[in-house]
Image: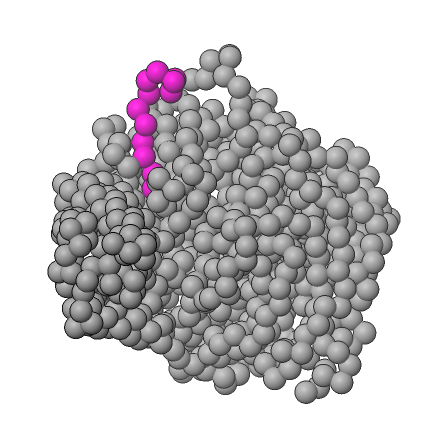
C-alpha cells in the first residue's frame, strides 16, 4: 500500500469517527427529544449518521449515497418546516452540508475507491442545499414592506408646554412623550452626510462597588444652548450644546452598593420659574434662588434640585436642595430597595415622583406610592398609594407610613398640561411571578395606566392591561399623547400605551375609554397551588406581538446540535402560548420579561400621525422554586447579599416560592459563557405604524451580528450581517422624515427613512448606546446626540461617551 493510500485511510478513519460522534450525539439527543414531545428528525438523522460512519469505516462507497439521502431528507424537512428563510434554515443544514462537502472531496472518494458516478448524488444534494440557503438569503418571510402616509394631517401642533422648536425640555422633548422634533435641517435627503461634531467624556465608570445592573440610559435635555444629563453615578453635567465643553458638573455623592438591583439614570427634568411665581400654598417665591432648575433622581432614594445656571443646589427646596424619598414615610428603608431611576413629571407647581422598588426581593418592600412635592419648597403635597384602601391618604401620626409593598411605577410618566392629567404606567408589587398573597387593593390599579389630576392626585381613570399579572408585564414604556384627526375632521385626544406583551392600547386620554378595540380572549389556566389566574386577558387590535404561539419551526441554534438542545429545552418547559402560568417545571414566557416594548416607547410624528418603533422578540423562562434547603422562607443572618440583578435566582422572601429567571437560551452553552438564543431571529426590528388606521405598515430586521450573538463577546469582530438584534432605548423621529435609533446590541447609531423604514445612514459607536437619542438646534445648526455608555447586563461594551452629530457646512440645505 502506498504512503498516499495510508494517509488517505487515516484521514478517512478520522472523518468516520467524527461522523460517528455527531451521529451518537444526535441519536442520544434525538431519543430525549422524542420522549419530551419533540420532532423525530434528530433521532432519524442520528441513526443515519451512525450507519454512514459504519460504511466509512468499512470503506464502502455506499456511505456517500446514504449521506446524500440524509442531506436530501434534511433539506426537504427544513423547507417544509421553516420555508425559505436563511437564518431559520441555517441550523438545520449547516452540519449536514459541512459533512457532505468533506465527504465529497476527491481524497475522501479515492480512499473509498468510489467512482465519480458514486459521488454525483451527494454532489447534487450539496448543490441543492446551497441553492436552498441562497434562496433563503434573498427571501425574508418576516419582513413586511410598506409606506407610511406622507401627508401632514395637522400642521399646527399645540404646544402647551411652550417648548421652542430648537430645544428639548423633557425625556420625550415634551412631557407628552412623543420623542419628535419639528426640526428639518437634517432630513432624509442629507442625513447620510452626518459627521461627528464633538465628543464629551464623563469619566464615570462601573466599579466593583456597583450593581451588576449598571446601565447608561440617559437622554439629555437642552435649553439656553446647554445640554443637561446624568451619568452612571448620577453626576449631573451641563454641556455647551455647540462645542461639547463642560460648563459645570454636580456630584450628588451617590451611596452606591453592589446589592442595588439597578444603577440607572434615564434622565433629568426641568422647571422654569414663571413671573409672579407662588408655591403650592400661594406664597410668593419670586425672590427665591434657581430661576431655572434641574431635577435629578438619585438611586439611593433622593431627588435633588440644582440651579441650571450655576450647578449649585436650590437651597430652599427640601433640606438643602434635597428631598429624601427613602426615609420619608416608608415602612422599610433598606438602601437600594427604593430607587428613583427615571425623570419625574414636573408641572408648574409640583414634582411628581415615581421610583423603582426591588423586584422579587421579599414581601417586605418599600411602598411604590406616587408622590407630589412642591417644586419650590419640597413639601409633600399629595400622594397616590395604589394598595392603600384610600390611595390619597396622607401620612399622619396615626398612619405615619405608606402601604408596604404597594405597586410602583419605575418608568417615565406622561403629562397633558391642557387637561392637567398625569399618566402613570404601573407595575405590580413584588414578587411578580406568584400572586397568591396579593390583596384586592394591591391589584386594583396594576398593571396598567392611571390618570391622575396633577394638582391633587385624585384618580380620573384607570385602564388595566393585564389581569392578575404573573409574568412581570408591568407597563414599562412612557405613553405617547397624540391628537388624532378622524375622517370627519374631528379630533380625538388619544393616549398610546406600548406594553411588554407587544400590544399597544389606544384610549381616549380624557376618559380612558378604548379607541381601538381590545377584546378579552381565553388564556391558559392551572397555576401552582395557592395562586389563581384570570380566565381571559385583553388583546389590543393594534399589536406587534406574534400572531401564533411558538412551535418547532421557531426553535433555533448556532448549529444543528445547538438547535437540538434548544428543542429538548423547549419541549421540557410548560408552554401553551401567551400567559402560560409560571410552574415548577419552568414556563416559557413569550413575549418575555424584557418585553416587546421597554422604557423607550414610541417615536410619534404628530403632524403626519405616524409612529416608529423598535420591538424586541426574545422569550424568557421563569421557574418557581419551592422553599427548602438552601432556599429559606426568610434570609438568615449569615447569608451575604449578592450583587443586584434581575436574572438568575430571585429569592422572593416571604412567599412559598423563589423564582429562576433567564432568557430562553441554550442552557448548556450558557454554562460555558456562550449565550445563543433558542428562538429563531429576528430578535429585534423596526416598525412603522399608521396611527389614523392603527395598522402596522412595515417591519424590518434591525441590527447585525457584528459584536455578538445576544451579548456573547467574540474575540474577533463578526461580519456585519443583518440578523435582527434586540435594542434597548427608544427611537427619535423628526419632521425631516428621519427616525434615529442607537439601542441595538451592535454598536451603531442608525438613521431610517420614516416612511419606509429603510436604513439611510449609520455610524460605528465606541460603546453600546442603550439610550434614546435626541436633537436640538444651536446657532442655526441642528445636532443629533446620543449617550454611548454601554449596558452591563444587556450586555454591551461599557463607555462614557456623549456624542453629537451634525452636517458639514454646505450640506445643511441639500
Viewed as shown, does residue 84 lie left or right of 275?
Answer: left
Which residues fall within the magenta stretch? 620-633
Which residue is rendered at x = 33% and y = 20% of the image?
627
**Up-down relation of residue 257 to residue 451 (above or below):** above
Which residue is rendered at x = 38% and y = 56% of the image?
617
Which residue is rendered at x = 59% and y = 81% of the image?
188
Query: Could you say which is closer to the camera, residue 466 or residue 489?
Result: 466
Q: Quadrant of the N terminus?
A: bottom left
Q: For residue 580, which quarter of the picture?
A: top left
Query: Could you say which is closer to the camera, residue 495 or residue 275?
Result: 495
**Up-down relation of residue 630 to residue 688 (above or below):** above
Q: Is residue 130 magenta?
A: no
**Percent from the top left, x then y, of residue 329?**
59, 28
Q: Is residue 630 magenta?
A: yes
Viewed as shown, does residue 313 lie left or right of 684?
Answer: right
Viewed as shown, does residue 103 lie left or right of 185?
Answer: left
Q: Quadrant of the C terminus?
A: bottom right
Seen from this angle, which residue lies furthest front? 1
Seen from this angle, which residue lies furthest bottom? 814
Amino acid at each position: 500500500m502506498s504512503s498516499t493510500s495510508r494517509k488517505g485511510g487515516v484521514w478517512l478513519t478520522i472523518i468516520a469517527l467524527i461522523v460517528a460522534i455527531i451521529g451518537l450525539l444526535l441519536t442520544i439527543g434525538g431519543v430525549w427529544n422524542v420522549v419530551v414531545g419533540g420532532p423525530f428528525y434528530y433521532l432519524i438523522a442520528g441513526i443515519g449518521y451512525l450507519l454512514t460512519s459504519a460504511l466509512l469505516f468499512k470503506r464502502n462507497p455506499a456511505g456517500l449515497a446514504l449521506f446524500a439521502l440524509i442531506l436530501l431528507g434534511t433539506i426537504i424537512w427544513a423547507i417544509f418546516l421553516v420555508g425559505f428563510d436563511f437564518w431559520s434554515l441555517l441550523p438545520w443544514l449547516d452540519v449536514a452540508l459541512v459533512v457532505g462537502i468533506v465527504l465529497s472531496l476527491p481524497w475522501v472518494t479515492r480512499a473509498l475507491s468510489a467512482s465519480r458516478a458514486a459521488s454525483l448524488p451527494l454532489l447534487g444534494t450539496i448543490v441543492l442545499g446551497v441553492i436552498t440557503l441562497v434562496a433563503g438569503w434573498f427571501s425574508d418571510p418576516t419582513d413586511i414592506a410598506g409606506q407610511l402616509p406622507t401627508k401632514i394631517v395637522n400642521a399646527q401642533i399645540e404646544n402647551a408646554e411652550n417648548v421652542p422648536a430648537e430645544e428639548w425640555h423633557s425625556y420625550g422633548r415634551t412631557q407628552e412623550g412623543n420623542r419628535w422634533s419639528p426640526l428639518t435641517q437634517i432630513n432624509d435627503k442629507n442625513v447620510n452626510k452626518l459627521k461627528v461634531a464633538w465628543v464629551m467624556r464623563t469619566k464615570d465608570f462601573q466599579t466593583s462597588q456597583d450593581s451588576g445592573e449598571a446601565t447608561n440610559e440617559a437622554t439629555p435635555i437642552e435649553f439656553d444652548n446647554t445640554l443637561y444629563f446624568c451619568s452612571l453615578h448620577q453626576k449631573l453635567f451641563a454641556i455647551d450644546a455647540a462645542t461639547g465643553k463642560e460648563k459645570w458638573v454636580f456630584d450628588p455623592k451617590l451611596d452606591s452598593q453592589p446589592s442595588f438591583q439597578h444603577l440607572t439614570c434615564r434622565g433629568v427634568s426641568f422647571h422654569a420659574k414663571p413671573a409672579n411665581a407662588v408655591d403650592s400654598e400661594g406664597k410668593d417665591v419670586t425672590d427665591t434662588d434657581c430661576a431655572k432648575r434641574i431635577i435629578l433622581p438619585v438611586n439611593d432614594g433622593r431627588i435633588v434640585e440644582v440651579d441650571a445656571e450655576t450647578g449649585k443646589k436650590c437651597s430652599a427646596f427640601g433640606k438643602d436642595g434635597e428631598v429624601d424619598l427613602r426615609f420619608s414615610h416608608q415602612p422599610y428603608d433598606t438602601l437600594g430597595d427604593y430607587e428613583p431611576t427615571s425623570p419625574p413629571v414636573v408641572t408648574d407647581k409640583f414634582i411628581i415622583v415615581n421610583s423603582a422598588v426591588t423586584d422579587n426581593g421579599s414581601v417586605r418592600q418599600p411602598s411604590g406610592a406616587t408622590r407630589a412635592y412642591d417644586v419650590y419648597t419640597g413639601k409633600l403635597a399629595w400622594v397616590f398609594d395604589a394598595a392603600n384602601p384610600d390611595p390619597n391618604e396622607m401620612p399622619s401620626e396615626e398612619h405615619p407610613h405608606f402601604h408596604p409593598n404597594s405597586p410602583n411605577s419605575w418608568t417615565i410618566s406622561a403629562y397633558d398640561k391642557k387637561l392637567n392629567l398625569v399618566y402613570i404606567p404601573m407595575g405590580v408589587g413584588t414578587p411578580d411571578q406568584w400572586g397568591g398573597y396579593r390583596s384586592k387593593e394591591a391589584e386594583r390599579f396594576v398593571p396598567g395606566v392611571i390618570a391622575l389630576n396633577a394638582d391633587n392626585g385624585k384618580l380620573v381613570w384607570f385602564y388595566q392591561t393585564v389581569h392578575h399579572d404573573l409574568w412581570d408585564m408591568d407597563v414599562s414604556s412612557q405613553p405617547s399623547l397624540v391628537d388624532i384627526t378622524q375622517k370627519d375632521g374631528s379630533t380625538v385626544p388619544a393616549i398610546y400605551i406600548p406594553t411588554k406583551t407587544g400590544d399597544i392600547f389606544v384610549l381616549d386620554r380624557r376618559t380612558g375609554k378604548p379607541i381601538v378595540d381590545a377584546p378579552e380572549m381565553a388564556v391558559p389556566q392551572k397555576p401552582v397551588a395557592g395562586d389563581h389566574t384570570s380566565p381571559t386577558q385583553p388583546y389590543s387590535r393594534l399589536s406587534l406581538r406574534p400572531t401564533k404561539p411558538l412551535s418547532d419551526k421557531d426553535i433555533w441554534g448556532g448549529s444543528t446540535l445547538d438547535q437540538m438542545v434548544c428543542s429538548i429545552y423547549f419541549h421540557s418547559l410548560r408552554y401553551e402560548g401567551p400567559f402560560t402560568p409560571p410552574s415548577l417545571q419552568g414556563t416559557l414566557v413569550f413575549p418575555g420579561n424584557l418585553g416587546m416594548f421597554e422604557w423607550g416607547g414610541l417615536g410619534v410624528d404628530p403632524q403626519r400621525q405616524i409612529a416608529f418603533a423598535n420591538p424586541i422578540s426574545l422569550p424568557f423562562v421563569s421557574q418557581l422554586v419551592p422553599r427548602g434547603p438552601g432556599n429559606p422562607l426568610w434570609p438568615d443572618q449569615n447569608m451575604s447579599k449578592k450583587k443586584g440583578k434581575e436574572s438568575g435566582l430571585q429569592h422572593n422572601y416571604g412567599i412559598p416560592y423563589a423564582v429562576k429567571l433567564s432568557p430562553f437560551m441554550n442552557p448548556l452553552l450558557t454554562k460555558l459563557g456562550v449565550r445563543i438564543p433558542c428562538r429563531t431571529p429576528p430578535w429585534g426590528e423596526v416598525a412603522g405604524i399608521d396611527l389614523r388606521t392603527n395598522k402596522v405598515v412595515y417591519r424590518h430586521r434591525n441590527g447585525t451580528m457584528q459584536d455578538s450573538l445576544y451579548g456573547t463577546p467574540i474575540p474577533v469582530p463578526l461580519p456585519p450581517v443583518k440578523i435582527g438584534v434586540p435594542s434597548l432605548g427608544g427611537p427619535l423621529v423628526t419632521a425631516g422624515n428621519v427616525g434615529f435609533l442607537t439601542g441595538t446590541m451592535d454598536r451603531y447609531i442608525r438613521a431610517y427613512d420614516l416612511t419606509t423604514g429603510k436604513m439611510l445612514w449609520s455610524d460605528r459607536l465606541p460603546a453600546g448606546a442603550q439610550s434614546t437619542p435626541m436633537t436640538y438646534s444651536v446657532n442655526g445648526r441642528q445636532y443629533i446626540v446620543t449617550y454611548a455608555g454601554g449596558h452591563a447586563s444587556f450586555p454591551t461594551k461599557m463607555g462614557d461617551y456623549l456624542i453629537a452629530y451634525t452636517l458639514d457646512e454646505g450640506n445643511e440645505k441639500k
